[in-house]
Image: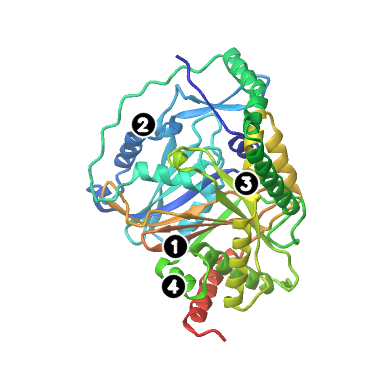
Amino acid sequence: MSHYERLSALDASFLGLEEANARWHEGAVMLFDRGPLTTPDGAVDVPKIARVYASALDRVERYRQRLATIPWLDHPVWVDDPSFDLRFHIRHVALPRPGSERQLKRVCGYLLSQPLDMTRPLWEVWVVEGLEDGRFALVTKTHHCMVDGASGMSILAALLRAEPDASCDDPQPWSPRPAPSGAELVGNELARRLTAPLALARPLRHPLQALQSARDVATGILEAARLGWSGASDTLFNPEQIGPHRRFDWAEMSLADVKEVKNRLGGTVNDVVLATAAGAIGEFLRQHRTSTRELDFRALVPVSIRSEKETRTLGNRVAMMMAELPVGERDPRERLRRVAETTGRLKSSKQALGVGWLEDFADRIGGRFFLELSRSATRSRPFNVAVTNVPGPPMPLYLMGARLRAIYPMMPLFSNQALGVAVISYAGQVFWGFNSDWDTLPDLHDLVVGVGSDFEQLRKAASQPAA
């Protein structure tokens, strides 16, 4: 029996945003102790790592699927890849020993710059050994049409364990299911689109609830449109077109320290992250002779709208929201207060509801509606940078007994966006990943250092009584 899975309108839009200079894969750099994954000659046991991935594929079937397209209707679907070969997806490179952290960052920037092969399953893992501290790195790349931050955590859970167990389950035999014919794909898609009005009209069975819901959705769409089609201030983070090469850098801080700041000064962990980013970005702009006093600087903040039933499903369930960042505010206490006020207003707004309804509407009617909507909004430059924060596992994780020490996430860039900041908490630490255009931000590391400095200012402010 044939099998396929249809991409949602949001998933398909991430495919449509792929350009020669803007590759739309997410990624991460994970640092491990070698531990039981050390071979007798001191190298990393790559075949063992491949065996872990092979044993996890039954729980992440998307990793053995490739893209196909519905004829004439131009909508992508997932089908099993009959030529799937795990060896193509797991690569192996080594730094000249002893490889420094700076060298690793350069290699990661290069690897994350390279496009995925769109004719195969859309993921890669690079094993990087030769690090000076005896560790090794896994550099992962997965196309955004497959996962968002939350579903990426489910893939991590399929690969890693909470105990330092060096055993590994046996990979299960697998046979690809036959792909449907073009006629079957077209017929099913036409039937879906013809029944779309009925699905959209279903809430009308309860007129009063439908009226209130319609008001909320309309309010949310108008709120999103107000920011989505009005340009933010022009800054060095927004060239007309980014180049094809990437710089990747990272930082980390104690989660306990972040929580202490929010407990003393108010807000949430995410507010502290945004306030820290705002402070560092503001100082970075001033160093580049950009006045921040009247700057309308905005961050694109993905918000998960994933229900409990969708916790372990792949794909994207996010609403993109715009938040003004007070980059001109030099007082760290006041900056955090303003960020918390902004995020509180966003939470009480209907933006996420309106954007979520548009995604569902586009998914029902099919076609390129949502992609063209996304492209149109992007061209108006409604935001300057993107900042995403995903809560990760609170306990240490292990890959066949090798402990995961750090995980630095990477988010893709729009064609006119030179910086993306991704943050994840894991095992008591907060890990920051900075993805940037190589040419636009040659001094990216100054911004990374500024994040640490600005957070220290917040900690100092939190330790002092309010004026």
Q: CA distance from mark 2 to mark 3?
A: 34 Å
Q: Is 191 rendered above or below residue 441?
A: above
Q: Secondary structure at mark 4?
A: helix
Closer to the eye: label 2 or 3: 3
Residue at the disc numbered 1: 430
Q: Are marks 1 and 3 in contact (CB under 8 Å)?
A: no
Which one is earlier in the sequence, the residue at label 2 or at label 3?
Answer: 2
Q: Secondary structure at mark 3?
A: helix
Which one is earlier in the sequence, the residue at label 1 or at label 3?
Answer: 3
Mark linked to residue 58: 2
Q: CA distance from mark 3 to mark 4?
A: 32 Å
Q: CA distance from mark 1 to mark 2?
A: 31 Å
Residue at the disc numbered 4: 260
Residue 23 image point, x, y percent: 60, 43
Residue type, mark 1 in image = Val
Residue 7 image point, x, y percent: 56, 31
Residue 137 image point, x, y percent: 39, 52
Residue type, mark 3 in image = Leu
Along the horizontal axis of the image, is 73 left or right of 7? right
Q: For the point 65% across and 50% down, which residue is it? A: 351
Q: Is 464 rendered above or below residue 2?
A: below
Mark linked to residue 353: 3
Neighbor class of circle 3 (other Cα within 10 Å; few <14, some 14-19, many 20+) is: many
Q: Nearer the viewer, residue 141 or 371?
A: 371
Residue 377 image point, x, y percent: 73, 47
Which one is earlier in the sequence, the residue at label 1 or at label 2?
Answer: 2
User: Does residue 182 show up?
Assistant: yes
Q: For the point 50% across and 85% down, which residue is it? A: 465
